[in-house]
Image (cartoon, rainbow, N blue to C red):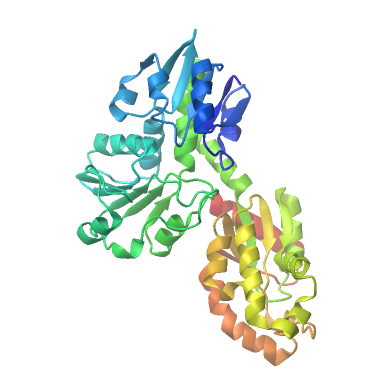
Amino acid sequence: MEYGLIGEKLTYSFSKIIHEEISDYTYDLCPLTKEEFKDFMEKKDFKAINVTIPYKQDVMPYLYEMDENSKNIGAVNTIVNKGGKLYGYNTDFYGFLYQVSHNDIDIKDKKVLVLGNGGASKAIIAVLKHLKAREIHIVYYKENPNTITYEECYKNHSDADVIVNTTPIGMLSKEQKSPINLDKFNNLSAVLDIVYNPLNTKLILWARKKGIKAVNGLEMLVAQAKYAVEYFKDTNISNSVIDKISKEITFDKSNLVLIGMPSAGKTTIGKICAEKLGKTFVDLDDVIVEKIGMSIADYFKLYGEDKFREVEKEVCAEYGLKNGMVIATGGGAIKNAINMENLKANGVVAFIERDIESLSIDPSRPLSRSVDALKDMYKERFPLYLKYSDITVYNKNNINHCADVLISEYKNFIL
């Protein structure tokens, strides 16, 4: 390996995509166990590498020299091999600084809570000090002289202005949950998460639901990569590449999730959108049928709606974490808030609205077997479709026009 990333678990990483877009080299992902890490660093068989969890501090004894930024931070995420001597840098500092400034997040004179006490947190704290935060408190699950516990945090710092998550909680390979209870705070103006895969962690979604500005870690990742490439290749690169690549990755990795009444046109419109967007189409009802081994109508008769909704919840959780898809949901997926939260992990949710007179009666579907059943269903679900949708498009029986409008709205939303 000449250029690449080392860390313990890297299946979630977008770094290969980013580096190969910015520069002209092949960039490899190199997951290492703690035993493999020692041998790798001693051999020094690389030109330049990035370092991620959990080795940002562990690499330091192997370095010939560190820049002042890395020394002050106490962590390294970029190493360049110059004639067998390893030089360490910290581009996380510049990446986070870009993320904060580009999103107009005011840190000066603010109380900031930093979640996590690992190598990633150190660069974030350095930036917060640089931006003159009034107070910085490190929140950690273990008792430590330099940190506070979550219980202390809730008790004494409910007036915090900004929260920054530097833990891996919420990452694709980790448990999908929020690292902190946002309902305990009454003064938050911003929440930042260095996790970028999925694009919208539980923490990010929770903050947005509460009307708090929330920013994922993608821009920080791309920005720190840009600065790392400058060290790798001894060159200067325009900051414009950061915004360009961030938008490209968001488009490529995001899903378009379609909700709406049965026969609203989700499947037909979804297939057209998938083809035009270069994404993969999936109908979650088809996935469920394959999973249960029978028709949905038969499953309803045998096991009832509650049992069906449990299967549906599992499928929504699985597909919500996939990338680059157009996902047509069953009409009732919105009845469970957890489904919609899971589908929003990488998804932009679009409500396909259609006049109730144009919807089809289907005797094989238990909940839409008559006009009255459809009207009752619409009355129950319409507020939920509005609640969970990011965009709404109207299917007025011109399928191709509806698909074109949906694609335009989707692109405007994410870009």
User: Horizontal placement of 73 versus 247: left or right?
Assistant: left
Q: Position of residue 108 (x, y in %)?
A: 23, 43
**Does 45 sit above or below residue 299?**
above
Residue farthest toward the top in the current orientation of the protein: 83
**Does 378 sit above or below residue 327?**
below
User: Horizontal placement of 366 versus 33: left or right?
Assistant: right
Q: Position of residue 309 (x, y in %)?
A: 63, 75
Residue 226 in sight: yes
User: Horizontal placement of 209 versus 334: left or right?
Assistant: left
Residue 332 in sight: no
Q: Residue at the location (51% across, 27% down)?
A: 37
Q: Count how many numbered circles sit on residues in the image.
A: 0
Q: Position of residue 231 (x, y in %)?
A: 46, 19
Considering the image in quadrants, where does the N terminus appear?
top right
Q: Residue at the location (76% across, 69% down)?
A: 289
Residue farthest toward the front in the current orientation of the protein: 35
The residue nearer to you, when weighing 53 against 382, is 53
Q: Position of residue 117 (x, y in %)?
A: 33, 42
